[in-house]
Amino acid sequence: MLLLFWVLLFLTAACLLLFMPALWGKHIYNEYRGRRTVNCPETHRPVTVRFNALRAAMTGLAAKPQLALADCSRWPERGNCDQACIPDAARALPDSHAAPAHPAALRIPHLPALLAAGAIWVLGVVWHSEYVFRSQWAKTVGLTDQQAHDLARTWMPHLVSVVVCLLFSYCVAIFLAWIGTRTLWRGLQISLSLWLLIAVALLVANQWNFGSNFLWIEGGYTLLGAILVGAIVGAVPGRLLLCDSK
């Protein structure tokens, strides 16, 4: 019961660690997305610029957002400019006549998210099986091999792991839907960024509860799982997205 309580407590903490930064990152991303019209410091004529909203959202999670232009109507001819218009662009409002995002960019890739959740759940079953790391894992949490075997035959640990897998996969899918770009690189970038938050939580919990072996076992599993999720959610072909929301 003590182990189950710790797992549920960690699940709650993981939810907060994942969703609170997600909400704040979404706010920053929305603030800096879209095209804006400003006066170019070089020509003193109107130009249309666009911020790298993803970079602003990612850097804004830890400190003040780092602003950089992703596009300008004077580029690529003047692509090497010093971007001195950034302060004015930050104060400007997005153009009201800017074209809305394509509806497909707002769709949550449900099927890839479910496939990714299933993949990392199966990976977890194999990873924590008696043929891989069950014995080492049991020792780190203070269980005998028989107790670990009995625990694996109950439904609660599997239910908790399914919830965690779905939670992580859908966090990555929702982030990609907000960004509007679903590629292998974007999927890995978002997934590994979220994994770092979980790794920090595991490190803190490890200091209070278990030995270093627990950190390496669970850290290795979650890292491989994050790579799987990023690859599947980010790169599954679009023709498989038959059940996506519209």
Image (tube, helix red, strand yellow):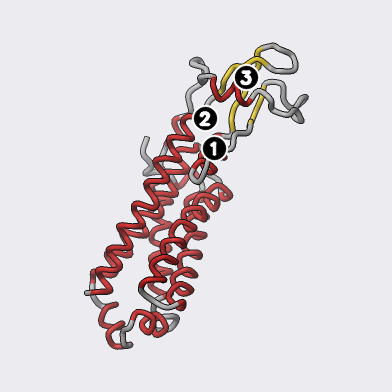
Q: Is residue 9 above or below residue 185?
A: below
In the rendered structure, which disc, 2 or 1, sits on the residue that comes first in sequence? Answer: 2
Q: Secondary structure at mark 2?
A: helix
Residue at figure coordinates x 49%, y 58% from the top left? 196
Q: Secondary structure at mark 3?
A: strand
Disc number lying in front (2 or 1): 1
Whether pointer 3 and pointer 1 mark residues with C-beta atoms closer than 8 Å, the reply is no
Q: What is the C-alpha distance between the residues marked 3 and 2?
A: 14 Å
Q: Is residue 198 above or below residue 190?
A: below
Tell me the number on the disc at residue 48: 3
Neighbour tally class for label 3: few under 14, some 14-19, many 20 plus, Cα within 10 Å: some
Q: Quadrant of the C terminus?
A: top left
Q: Is residue 68 above or below residue 78?
A: below
Q: Is residue 214 above or below residue 109?
A: below
Tell me the number on the disc at residue 65: 1
Tell me the number on the disc at residue 32: 2
Q: What is the C-alpha distance between the residues marked 2 and 1?
A: 10 Å
Residue 58 position within the rendered picture, expressed as x and y whole percent measured from the top left: 52, 43
Disc number lying in front (3 or 1): 1
Residue 119 position within the rendered picture, expressed as x and y whole percent measured from the top left: 42, 63
Name the residue type under label 3. Answer: Thr
In the rendered structure, which disc, 3 or 2, sits on the residue that comes first in sequence? Answer: 2
Residue 59 position within the rendered picture, expressed as x and y whole percent measured from the top left: 54, 43
Name the residue type under label 1. Answer: Pro
Residue at figure coordinates x 62%, y 23% from the top left? 49
Q: Is 71 displayed left or right of 5 in the figure?
A: right
Name the residue type under label 2. Answer: Tyr
Whether pointer 3 and pointer 2 mark residues with C-beta atoms closer than 8 Å, the reply is no
In the depicted view, which residue is nearer to us: 184 or 216?
216
Residue 205 position within the rendered picture, expressed as x and y whole percent measured from the top left: 38, 67
Disc number lying in front (3 or 2): 2
